Image (spheres, rainbow, N blue to C red):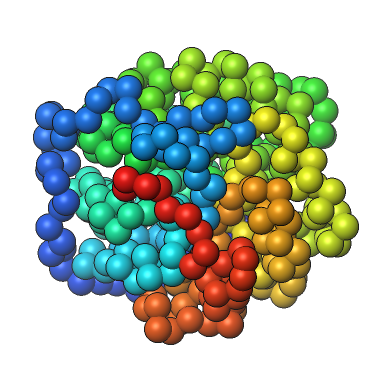
Amino acid sequence: MKQIILSIVTASTLLFTACTPTNITPVGTPAGSTTPAAVSAATTITIKGKHIVTTCGDTIILKGVNYAPYGWGWNNSENLFPEIAKSGANSVRLVWYKTNSGPAYSNMALLDSAIGRCIRYKMIPILELHDETCNNNGTSMVATANWYTQTAVKNILVKYQKWLIINPLNEAGYVMWNGNNATALNAFKATYKTIITNLRNAGLNMPMMLDASDCGQHLKVWKTICTEMQTYDPKHNLIFSAHAYWSSYAGTAAAINTLLQDASTWNVPIVLGEVANKQDDNNGNCTLTLDLTTTLQKCEQYKIGWLAWVWTADNCGSRQMTTNGNFNALTTYGNQIINTSPYGLKFAKRAKCL
């Protein structure tokens, strides 16, 4: 569900229809509990240089999918984690909202259940907030990210901190699209430094995956600031992400190779938090074809993680990995993502002790 311009964003949730009664039993401690399950406060996934290290001590390259649980918030009984797990994915980026009319998003028991089910099926959950997509308002970005620090939310996150990654905001902040100068870059840095401080002060010690600027596309924004940001984080536990909607940003195989080869030398973990076969044009239609094959081949070559957009329910049918969420209903795109050797999800390594 991508866009090049800001106006596409707000329409996305209108694509999905409601609704069934709330009938999911949450996994583990209820969301309102003040006693999270027993996990060491220091036991989280950690970052060592460019490597993501699990609590088992093994190094993992994130390879997975994006999935909006509960039918983008409108179907409280939806549970597609067993189907996603059949793909071999070792991680799932979970689309969530702080403020959205989908009823699931205000139900913390459902958030608890989604994270818990993901882990139960041996996939690392990456929780992200979609509210600020392609927004450049730093005040709003910080306010939205503070959702993670609310007691009811924080209790859930700490409960699952052994395996959880937080992706505070989806595709927020401009640099390239805001003059591409020092002022824009400093504003982007300052906003994310505030977010890091607020979440760490709240006791959230798990890795944070930060999206690049300019609707997530601007991977090179991290080149000059990733070390500074990693040093700034008191836990030194950051992952740096970009979304590979690069029809103009890196529109040739050579450009993709140059970009990813360079990123592999930055000594921080790089993940393409969204990869896809199609990109929306300025009218919101998925008419722009992306060189997915080269992107995934080069990710494999340079040991860069990636997460495919999207498992199901997109505004672009050819960008869905499945037609209905079931593993036995793979699209041509889904088949490529899962079954192509050597980069496909079925060849992904999962954490040893998850």
Give coordinates of residue 263: x percent, y percent.
74, 40
Q: Nearer the viewer, residue 196 or 238?
A: 238
Give coordinates of residue 224: x percent, y percent.
76, 26
Q: Is residue 35 left or right of residue 298?
A: left
Q: Nearer the viewer, residue 190 or 335?
A: 335
Q: Is residue 290 above or below residue 178?
A: below
How many numbered marks are there?
0
Q: Nearer the viewer, residue 351 or 161?
A: 351
Identify the residue at horizontal 48%, vertical 55% (top origin): 349
Give the quarter of the figure containing the N terminus.
bottom right
Q: Is residue 207 above or below residue 258?
A: above
Quadrant position of residue 200: top left
Identify the residue at horizontal 37%, vertical 54% (top origin): 123
Quadrant position of residue 7: bottom right
Q: Is residue 33 left or right of residue 57?
A: left
Give coordinates of residue 19: x percent, y percent.
25, 71
Give coordinates of residue 166: x percent, y percent.
43, 38
**Does the rendering let one see residue 243?**
yes
Identify the residue at horizontal 22%, vertical 52% (top origin): 113
Q: Is residue 80 left or right of residue 321?
A: left
**Does the rendering let one see residue 133?**
no
